[in-house]
Image (spheres, grey):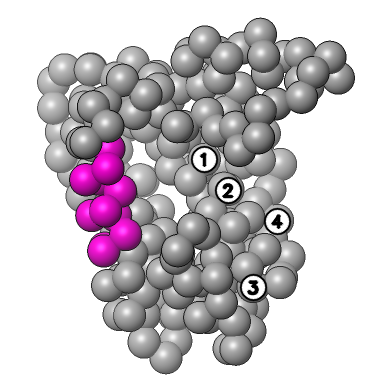
């Protein structure tokens, strides 16, 4: 799989998804206490972060893989995680309000900027992320993962179809599996996927 192709494909698919959201669904419940508008606002902030992260170079790799990025949250102090979630919620709501009367146009714009920024970096460039220094080839799949997961969230809340593409979906599922292994849940996941047991209620690889 090509991590650049996967990201571009799901980014374009997400933009297409937003263009099909019914007007009367924007304030529908979507994820937790977020409305659909809040959720899309959250994804828009992530698209806007891509050029900034790719421009913030560092010389040290602190997070060596995509799965380590997500596993990092499992060892972060709970109060720090709670603060980050609260800030993310505020940012999502503010970004949602800023989408105006044509959210699809805003999403198209931020998708274009993110993919243009990606074209300007090399796979092994080391960038500064929220978790620490990472190679582009390790960090970008975490963005693909977010887009696939939140694309599904948006599609369910809006009642429309979402097709992230084979590469993006396969990359997201593979990454989720690697995260499960990284946090010690590999045996549990394997047994569940082979029909030996069931996952616990509300099980999540990212805490």
Q: Which mark is residue 158?
A: 3
- For marks 2 and 4, the one nearer the N-term is 2
Q: Residue furthest right?
A: 195
Tag 2 near tag 3, CB within 8 Å: no
Q: Is residue 99 left or right of residue 30?
A: left
- For marks 3 and 1, the one nearer the N-term is 1
Residue at x 71% of width, y 70% of height: 160
Q: Is residue 28 above or below residue 67?
A: below
Residue at x 58% of width, y 48% of height: 148
Tag in front: 4 or 3: 3
Label 2, label 4: how far apart the Cα atoms are: 9 Å
Residue indicated by mark 4: 163
Query: For numbered disc 1, what is the local secondary structure?
Result: helix
Tag 4 near tag 3, CB within 8 Å: no
Where is residue 91 shown, x and y percent of the image?
A: 26, 63
Residue indicated by mark 1: 145
Residue extent of the magenta highlight: 81-91
Q: Which mark is residue 148?
A: 2
Closer to the camera, 65 or 150? 150
Tag 2 near tag 1, CB within 8 Å: yes
- For marks 4 and 3, the one nearer the N-term is 3
């Amino acid at each position: 799989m090509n991590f650049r192709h996967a990201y571009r494909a799901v980014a374009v698919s997400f933009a297409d998804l937003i263009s099909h959201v019914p007007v009367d669904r924007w304030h529908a419940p979507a994820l937790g206490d977020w409305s659909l508008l809040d959720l899309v606002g959250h994804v828009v902030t992530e698209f806007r972060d891509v050029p900034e992260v790719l421009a913030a170079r560092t010389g040290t790799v602190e997070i060596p893989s995509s799965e380590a990025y997500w596993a990092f949250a499992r060892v972060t102090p709970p109060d720090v995680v709670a603060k980050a979630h609260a800030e993310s919620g505020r940012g999502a709501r503010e970004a949602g309000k800023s989408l105006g009367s044509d959210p699809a146009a805003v999403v198209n714009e931020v998708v274009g900027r993110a993919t243009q920024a990606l074209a300007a970096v090399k796979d092994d460039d080391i960038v500064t992320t929220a978790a620490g220094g990472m190679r582009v080839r390790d960090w970008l799949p975490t963005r693909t993962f977010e887009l696939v997961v939140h694309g599904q969230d948006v599609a369910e809340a809006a009642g429309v179809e979402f097709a992230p593409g084979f590469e993006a979906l396969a990359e997201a599922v593979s990454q989720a599996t690697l995260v499960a292994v990284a946090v010690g849940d590999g045996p549990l996941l394997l047994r569940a996927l082979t029909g030996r047991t069931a996952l616990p209620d509300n099980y999540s690889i990212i805490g």
